[in-house]
Image: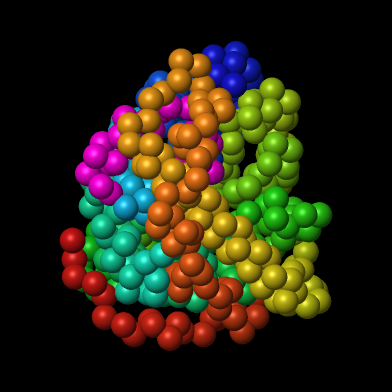
């Protein structure tokens, strides 16, 4: 799928923007960044941000030679596989930030943002916060935000990152309890930043909801979460933050598959992260029907089992997502380990294809068995429980921890 394919189709993404929906691209590898694809998509179709996807990097390692030159440099320096993987991600994020920086500047920081995931091996709230600061400093662009999990420790780290002025893309959440806990971390983080005299307008925040994981309940739960979102924006704490300059958080629908549910997830103040094939399908066949979230969901007071998704179900979905994320990081580390062992990867003429025997598909080098990602504290657990749908969440155990020093 190319940018030209999208440029000849109806202008659905710009129509989404007119409805208050921010369209993002979910995942693009080094080859697409090097070829200027993201910049062209932003200019021609209305893509307004990028959710960096580790899966796109893994696919690029397996199928193209786009990472070969950087891997050769990293191998020559004797860089460990985990560090090398983080450097690959930082390089991709920096290229993406450069592609979207004109949009970021033109919209005074409202659009043109790039969300980059953090590796799960740093562990604990302190380690995650330190990794977030290192990543932001390494990318060295104003339009980068860090992706953090909506676990108890992840939300505590989110609060501290927001309090230090870092933008955060937190999630995914799988029910109103998890979303309520995320909102409380968002409020508390912005309050920290306000008390430190930071510019709240420059601190971006997103709450991710993986639609594909929710199955048949996805649209109903999305409407419920949107009702929670509107309730949060009516809270006195939020009004105080608005007076201090804060911008609203955005609910970001991710994991949209082929994009078939897009027209049912339209609401002001939301975002959608779509893969390139999903963008093409949406542009080709989606017909918008205006706002399909506001006032269309079941009222909270009439919902059994605390709001559509039972806590046990939400916990199971969160645990499954954590396992899948750890497995993907482990796979990425193994691939990088093998590429570094080759010493001087050479890009093929047309796609990587099968790797010659004795190269990257050979035996895993000594020490590689220790590289798969262990279950880390930063991804452990499930969203912190709340008192009820859209109600007050209990304070995090780490909420009273002192903020990290300002950058």
Identify the residue at image location x=66%, y=44%. 256
In the image: residue 302, left or right of residue 406:
right
Residue 91: % across, % down: 32, 39
Colouring scheme, one of rainbow, by chain, secondary structure, one colour: rainbow
Tell me: residue 279, above or below residue 212: above
The image quarter containing residue 297 is bottom right
Can residue 121 be seen? yes
Identify the residue at image location x=26%, y=80%. 402
The image quarter containing residue 197 is bottom left
Residue 287 lies in magenta, yes or no? no
Tell me: residue 181, above or below residue 342: below
Identify the residue at image location x=38%, y=37%. 342
Q: What span is in magenta?
A: 53-79
Tell me: residue 105, above or below residue 178: above
Residue 306: % across, % down: 73, 77
Asked whether 382 or 121 is in front, the reply is: 121
Identify the residue at image location x=26%, y=57%. 134
Residue 28: % across, % down: 48, 34
Can residue 185 be seen? no
The image quarter containing residue 72 is top left
Residue 334: % across, % down: 48, 49
Instruction: Give the dominant element type of the magenta stretch: helix, strand or loop.
Output: helix
Query: Where's the C terminus, which quadrant?
Result: bottom left
Asked whether 52 or 19 is in front, the reply is: 52
Residue 64 lies in magenta, yes or no? yes
In the image: residue 314, left or right of residue 121:
right
Query: Where's the N terminus, which quadrant?
Result: top right
In the image: residue 5, left or right of residue 74:
right
């Amino acid at each position: 799928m190319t940018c030209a394919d999208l440029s000849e189709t109806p202008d659905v993404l710009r129509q989404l923007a007119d409805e208050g929906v921010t369209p993002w691209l979910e995942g693009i590898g080094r080859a697409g960044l090097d070829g200027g694809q993201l910049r062209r998509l932003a200019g021609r179709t209305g893509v307004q941000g990028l959710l960096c996807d580790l899966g796109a990097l893994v696919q690029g390692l397996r199928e193209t030679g786009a990472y070969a030159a950087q891997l050769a440099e990293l191998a020559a320096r004797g860089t460990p596989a985990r560090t090398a993987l983080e450097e690959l991600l930082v390089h991709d994020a920096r290229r993406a930030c450069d592609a979207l920086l004109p949009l970021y500047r033109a919209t005074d920081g409202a659009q043109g943002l790039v969300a980059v995931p953090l590796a799960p091996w740093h562990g604990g709230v302190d380690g995650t916060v330190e990794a977030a600061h290192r990543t932001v400093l390494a990318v060295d662009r104003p339009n980068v935000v860090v992706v953090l999990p909506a676990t108890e420790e992840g939300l505590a780290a989110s609060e501290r990152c927001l309090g230090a002025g870092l933008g955060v893309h937190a999630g995914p959440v799988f029910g109103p309890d998890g979303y309520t806990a995320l909102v409380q971390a968002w409020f508390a983080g912005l309050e920290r930043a306000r008390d430190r005299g930071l510019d709240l307008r420059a601190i971006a925040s997103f709450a991710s909801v993986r639609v594909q994981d929710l199955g048949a309940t996805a649209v109903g739960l999305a409407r419920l979460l949107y009702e929670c979102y509107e309730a949060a924006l009516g809270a006195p704490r939020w009004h105080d933050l608005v007076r201090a300059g804060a911008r609203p958080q955005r609910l970001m629908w991710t994991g949209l598959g082929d994009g078939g549910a897009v027209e049912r997830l339209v609401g002001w103040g939301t975002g959608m992260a779509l893969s390139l094939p999903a963008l093409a399908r949406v542009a080709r066949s989606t017909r918008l029907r205006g706002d399909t979230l506001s006032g269309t969901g079941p009222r909270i007071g009439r919902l059994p089992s605390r709001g559509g998704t039972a806590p046990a179900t939400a916990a199971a979905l969160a645990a499954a997502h954590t396992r899948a994320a750890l497995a993907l990081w482990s796979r990425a580390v193994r691939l990088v380990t093998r590429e570094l062992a080759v010493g001087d990867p050479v890009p093929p003429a047309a796609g990587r294809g099968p790797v010659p025997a004795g190269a990257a598909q050979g035996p895993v080098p000594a020490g590689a068995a220790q590289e798969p990602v262990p279950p880390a504290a930063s991804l452990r657990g499930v969203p912190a429980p709340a008192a009820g749908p859209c109600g007050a969440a209990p304070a995090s155990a780490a909420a009273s921890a002192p903020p990290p020093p300002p950058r």
